[in-house]
Amino acid sequence: MKKQLIYWYRKYTPKKIQEILIKKEPFWFKLYRHKKMAKTFNAYEEGNREHYEIITLIEKMSIKERFYVDLGASNGVSSSSTFLFAKNQNWGGLSVEFDEEKFLIMKNIYKDFNMAYLSKIKITPNNIKSILEENKVPKNFTFLNLDIDSYDLLIVKEILKNKFKPYIISMEINEKIPPPIYFTVLYNENHFWKGDHFFGCSIVAADSVLKEYGYKLYKLQYNNAIFVSENYPIEFESLSPSKAYDQGYRFKDDRETRFSYNRDVDALLDMNPNECIKFIDKFFSEYKGLYKLSIMD
């Protein structure tokens, strides 16, 4: 019954009302709620099941190293792709979050996770190398999760350019923008996500950059693209962005329910590439000059 009530709430309560209720929720209650969530955390049921997918992939790959990096870790629990790693004493890791309230919740919940290091800092292309080095992140590590709701593509590119080589990378993509559209938010030191559709990059942009650094697209789990280093011996069908997008988002049976807030941009799914470009340029007109947009052949 509890899950059904949550489903009805998420489906029928307008997103703006949900946001107002969250903002009015007192901190002590948020902390209580997330502590309770941490006690009953289930990787399969949490978020869009990306944590479950990563755990399954690590087991399939028989990776012996146990180190994660979570950039944009939020409160460390809800929709987390790394919570069970942070909790596990056999893992080491780094969780980075800039939002004050979210960081305080994570710090409280993670206080007994001795091998999980926390950092409260705004991540930029200019400081990501020093963040990793100062927190003694090894050059080769198990898993990188990236979700900073802005210039994510520039961050992952900077990480790989500086010879850090995670075996698995999961990054949130802007699921609204279908192939063959290349889209990415550009770096702006004053940029903060406003809770709208302007964030991250398209799956085509992510695949294009990561392919340059030796990564293959493993799958798209709704709005999280999972890549595997081609240097790690594992057999799987490397997906094209179009196939991954169709399987992992466009034709998902529950897409419209999970992503009901995308209804105002769902028209993109039925447009040809040139129509998409015009639509996106008009939709993001207030962000002119702050993004890169093109059609990939």
Image: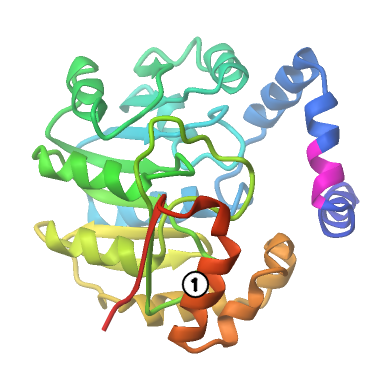
Residue 64, can we see it? no
Left/right placement of residue 131 relative to residue 243 reads: left
Among the 4 quarters of the image, the one containing residue 187: top left
Relative depth, front residue between 247 and 180 = 180
The answer to whether residue 120 is visible is yes
Q: Position of residue 266 (x, y in %)?
A: 65, 75
In the displayed structure image, the side of residue 84 where residue 67 appears, left or right? left
On the image, numbered disc 1 is attached to which residue?
248
Question: In the depicted view, which residue is nearer to us: 178 or 187?
Answer: 187
- Amino acid at circle 1: Gly
Residue 79, above or below 127: below
Label total for image: 1
Residue 270 position in % (x across, y down): 58, 87
- Magenta residues, start to end: 15-19
Q: Main secondary structure of the magenta part?
A: helix
The residue located at (42%, 27%) in the rendering is 86
In the rendered view of the protein, which quadrant contains the C terminus?
bottom left
